Amino acid sequence: MEIVLTVNETKHKVEVSSSETLLDLVRRLGYKSVKFGCGEGACGACTVLLDGRPVNSCLVLALAADGREVVTVEHLGDSRRPHVIQEAFIEAGAIQCGFCTPGMILAAQALLDKNPKPSEAEIKEAIDGNLCRCTGYVQIIEAVQLAAKRLKKKPRKGAKSTKI
Ligand code: FES
Ligand code: FES
C-alpha cells in the first residue's frame, strides 16, 4: 500500500506492507537516529514525534502514519549545528553510549515544547518511558533543566531537516 508521510519536513510517498512498523519505515528512509532497542514498547530507543507527540515507533504501524508528520532527532540539529537540547546533553555529560540519546532528546523536546519550565518530577515523568543503561539519569535530568534555562533565554526552533 502507498502512504504519504512527512519526515522532518520532507514528504515521502512510499510503499509499505501491512505489518511494517514506523520504526522500520523511518530507518528504511534513512533516519538512522531512530534505534531498535526492545521492539516491544519497553525502552523508548525508537521514540519519534508523531504530530508533535512522542511515540514508540516500534509499536506504530507505518500505515498509521499516512498523512501525518514525523520528527526524528536529525531535525533538531547535528554535530555542526547542535540544538540547545543537544548541547545541554553534551555539556551535562548525559551521553555515554548514546543509544538512548535520540529518544531522550525527543522526549525532552516534546516536554519543553508544552512546558518550558518543568519541575524535576515533570522531567522524570516525561522520560519515564526512555531507558538508559549508562548514565543513571541524574545527568539527563540536569541536561533537560539546563536546556530549559537556555531555551527560556534564547528560544530557538530546530534546524531544518538534515538527512544522514
Ligand atoms: S524499540 Fe521501541 S520501545 Fe524499545
Ligand atoms: S547513554 Fe547508553 S543507554 Fe543511555
Image: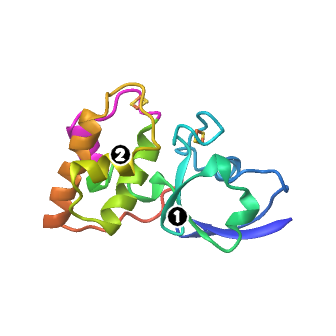
Percent position of residue 96, x then y? 35, 27
**What residue sits 39% from the left and 60% below the top?**
110
Residue to which mark 1 is pinned: 8
Q: Is residue 91 magenta?
A: yes
Residue depicted at 35% across the width and 59% down the height: 111
Q: What stretch is highlighted in magenta?
A: 86-99
Residue 85 point in image, percent of width and height: 29, 52
Task: State the CA–CA distance, disc 2 to disc 1.
Answer: 17 Å
Choose between 158 and 39: the one closer to the eye: 39
Look at 72% across and 71% down and name the residue there: 4
Badge 1 amino acid:
Asn
Residue at the image position 82 percent from the left and 67 percent from the top:
2
Where 13 sits versus 81, above or below?
Answer: below
Q: How crowded is mark 1: few (under 14 residues within 10 Å), some or many (20 or more)?
A: many
Which corner quadrant of the image does residue 40 belong to?
top right
Residue located beneath label 2 in the image: 79
Q: Are the residues flagged by discs 2 and 1 in contact, CB closer than 8 Å?
A: no
Three-letter amino acid code of the residue under disc 2: Ser
